[in-house]
Image (spheres, grey):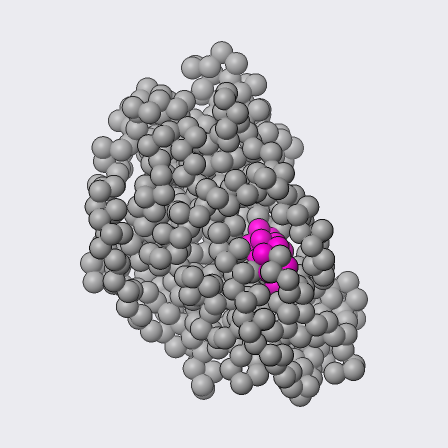
Amino acid sequence: MADYETHRHDVLVIGAGGAGLRAAIEASASGVSVGLVCKSLLGKAHTVMAEGGIAAALANVDDRDDWRVHFADTMRGGQYVNNWRMAELHAKEAPARVRELEAWGAVFDRTPDGRILQRNFGGHRYPRLAHVGDRTGLEMIRTLQDRGVHQGIDVHMECTVTRLLVDDGRVVGAFGFDRPRGRFKVFEARAVVLATGGIGRAYKITSNSWEYTGDGHALAYAAGADLMDMEFVQFHPTGMIWPPSVQGILVTESVRGEGGILTNKDGRRFMFEDIPEAYKGQTADNEEEGWRYTQGDKAARRPPELLTRDHVSRCIVREIKEGRGSPHGGVYLDISWIKKRLPNAEEHIKRKLPSMYHQFKQLADIDITREPMEVGPTTHYVMGGVRVDAETQMSTVPGLFAAGECAAGINGANRLGGNSLSDLLVFGRRAGEHAARFARESGPGRIDPARVDVAARQAVEPFERGDGHADGPYRVQRDLQEMMQDLVGIVRTESEMRRALEGLQGLWERSRRVPVDGNREYNPGWHTALDLPNLLTASEAVTRSALERKESRGAHFREDFPDKDPASAKFNVVVRKAADGVMRVERVPIPEMPPELRQVIEEMK
């Protein structure tokens, strides 16, 4: 392989967000050589968009909190199709990971007596989110990068991996290219960790940045790994609505955690009208009670705006569909109303929500301390991903590990806000630890030069397509995004998803004919063309999995099957690539939960 720039590492981590950095740090600390590949520049990870906080049962604000409550909240939020062992490990280990981050230099907001401050968040029974204003993800990335740069990790920035290299059923490396120059790279590795994030760019309205094209999902699938829970796509209730140039940009849940309320065009706080049975008795009955809870009164119950994201999203959609939405097709999120309660409300908002204040002021010319925001649901997170072992994070392909959003299991049918950042820390660490162990215990694999040549030829194919009548890559991507938004979005039906499957077949054909002009040096059209197969793979997995689950559960809502099916709580939907190249769907039983964990859930009800 002398024709290709080749790098050799014991462990290769693909993705440099919170999960990837934490995995690389742990693997490097184990004494193995580590390579870290990031699609963009180091530091520009989607983790920085996780603004609200890190969920961990530190019990600094409410001493009733502990891992058992956090575990029960996570399972209930996930509608009990979570990998219960992952939920248990996460709840038990998250506090240690937060304190470790603090020891590495993270600067958290503090209680009056100097402990890490925690705030309320949707679906969490007690104030649980350790935070840095509304810039928690940014502080996490800064801290992990500072820790990682001193450990001798080789960083390959602006590099896209297009294929995992497999030998005798085991992953032995990866093939990709550097985006600025278009030069091909081969990475030899004894173990590979996927930490590539989500699939949000498969949808028209999304909070996700351009990198989120389902790369890890598609790489794992093509290598023979199972994907699981792909029907569960989370639509965050609050994305920016107006102006059109900012549509979908995230409005952090911290706004509601600090007292923000949702109202319709009539000024009515509509979330009081639809409280799920499971949350009755834990949710405020009136504005006064909701306000007391926001301010930290242990006796008060949570405001209805802090119910789980799937429920809040559907309530917002209902208001819009029934004609009670805001002028631009959303609803109102109002934090300025707290001026009725706090004499220094404007300064309080600017101190607690500095990023949101500047985001709306600069992008929409709205002062959130004085007027409400227009918001609506935006594609935010995918609970589904690579099926992994709870203890080691290894996929069904030996040598291939996954962590963070591109891994499945912990969140089940719906993720609670704040669990994403603690997930990155807990399972990023585990993935790095066990990938390093696998690398130490395994000899170097053999990379077949012929397979590398095939990957290189496939990468440059778009330049060789001279069909001037074929659609360009941007048009194909736009048509995919609009179709997924319309047919496989917040509310789903079988007939619409069948139409989506037919549409996906047509989009696959169009993607194979996409021509690209210019050369390989920083060519965004070429990059988009190479992203299309990943987006299409992820979209097909979502659609086929959603068709298989004939019920409504968590973030998956079927208008033709609006109720939960108790039998469906006993399986996960898994997709894998069959020998004939066709995507196969299978129901895999969920292992029986041990009695001691069942007892925890019963006690917490």
Q: Position of residue 560 (x, y in %)?
A: 26, 59
**Image quadrant of residue 595?**
bottom left
- Residue 105, compared with residue 492, is above or below; it is above
Q: Is residue 261 visible?
A: no
Q: Does the stretch in magenta take in 23?
A: yes
Looking at this rendering, what residue extends furthest in the top direction?
343
Q: Residue at x 45, y 21 (%)?
A: 337
In the rendered image, the quadrant that contains the C terminus is top left
Q: Residue at x 55, y 74 (%)?
A: 441
Q: Is residue 390 visible?
A: yes
Q: Is residue 359 left or right of residue 374?
A: right
Q: Position of residue 214 (x, y in %)?
A: 54, 63
Magenta stretch, main secondary structure, is helix
- Residue 88, compared with residue 244, is above or below; it is below
**Image quadrant of residue 305?**
top left
Q: Residue at x 44, y 73 (%)?
A: 396
- Residue 595, compared with residue 12, is above or below; it is above
Between 493 and 588, the one lying in front of the other is 588
Q: Residue at x 32, y 19 (%)?
A: 288
Between 72 and 575, the one lying in front of the other is 72
Q: Is residue 330 left or right of residue 168?
A: left
Q: Is residue 154 left or right of residue 273?
A: right
Q: Position of residue 302 (x, y in %)?
A: 33, 31
In the rendered image, the quadrant that contains the N terminus is bottom right
Number of numbered tags placed on the structure image:
0
Q: Does the stretch in magenta take in 139?
A: no
- Residue 441, compared with residue 488, is above or below; it is below
Between 431 and 132, the one lying in front of the other is 431
Q: Position of residue 212 (x, y in %)?
A: 57, 57
Residue span colored magenta: 12-28
